[in-house]
Image (cartoon, grey):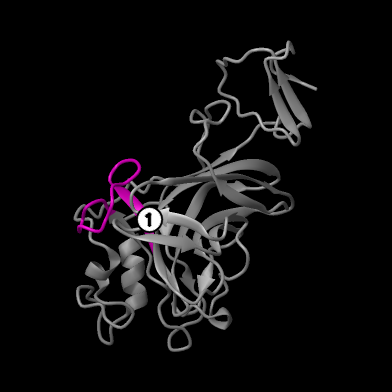
Amino acid sequence: MKKIILVFSFTLLFVPIYSQTNIVNHGDFEYGNNVSCDPMENTTGSCPNKCDNCITGFPCNLQKCIENYFDNYEGWFAPKRKLPFPFCNAVGSPDIWCEYFINSYPAARSGIRYGHIWSDNDNAEYLVNELTEPVKNDNYFVEFYLKTLTFNSVNVYSAGIRFYENHPKQCGSDGTLGNNNEWGEPHLKIKDGTLLTGNEWKHAYGYFSTSGKNYKYLSFGRFNEFPFGYRILVDDIRVIKLGPNFCPPYWKFQNTEFNTNMLFQAADYITIGENHDNTTVV
């Protein structure tokens, strides 16, 4: 299995890939029954000790409140609780926000919704998606877009995407290593120190190869401890299965204009406009 560090880029890929199938279930976060756009805190009360607006009996069952919240969003979940109460409190409480719900919520990249996590040493939140088909024995293109709150800027560390064979679990929202089996390096990691602002969505993308695994879930979050916390907004997460031409040593093209929807990647280089046959693997 190859781990690849994601880099941010604003350059155009050689060819579009948007006609290919995204196996992330509602990776744009747009499908939901929560028409009021209430964030998690408005549904459960102040985390982690209250759930004023979630009637689940006494004492308050915050874990159930979190599960009820994500029942409104097809494909999206929080981690499962690793051990029952009182051994584990409720898991971290990520949520799905709507643009401009309050002044500090910036515009979505597409539609009106995006995912949100808060993470520091005392609180670790993860958004979990059940993929529409497993990631297994093939090569994949992965991309997503990141931002932080309006008027803010943060340098992100240890953040990215991790794949799981089973629904990932968490022991409480505590961000310490011993309580949280989400920890470990993400399979696709954002370059440490990358600056996020609330003014623009930054594009992260990379490639992922797997063999002998059957990953059914994707999780987005921060996967190691760091001494200060911040909010990360994420939108338009896509995982695309690539064809058999995933990675030859290099490609050579005669043309500089393309009318194909294939994605071309080379292990060494791609040459364009030097009298070579178009779309021929060398």
In magenta stretch: residue 110: yes
Compare residues 118 and 162 and report the one nearer the observer.
118
Instruction: Tell me the chief SS of the magenta region.
Output: loop
Specify whether 274 is left or right of 23.
Answer: right
Label 1 SS: strand
User: Which quadrant is home to the C terminus?
Assistant: top right
The residue located at (42%, 62%) in the rendering is 154
* 236, above or below 37, in the image: above
Residue 209 percent coordinates (x, y): 69, 46
Specify whether 184 is left or right of 154.
Answer: right
Specify whether 228 is left or right of 267.
Answer: left
* 116, above or below 229, in the image: above
Residue 137 percent coordinates (x, y): 71, 45
Image quadrant where residue 213 sits? bottom right
* 7, above or below 70, in the image: above
* 272, above or below 122, in the image: above
Amino acid under disc 1: Gly
Residue 82 percent coordinates (x, y): 52, 77
The residue located at (34%, 73%) in the rendering is 64
Specify whether 45 is left or right of 79.
Answer: left
Figure disc tally: 1
* Residue 71 in sight from this viewpoint: no
Q: Which residue is mark 1?
A: 115
The residue located at (26%, 81%) in the rendering is 50
Compare residues 148 and 141 and report the one nearer the observer.
148
Compare residues 8 and 31 and report the one nearer the observer.
8
* Residue 185 in sight from this viewpoint: yes
Range shown magenta: 98-117
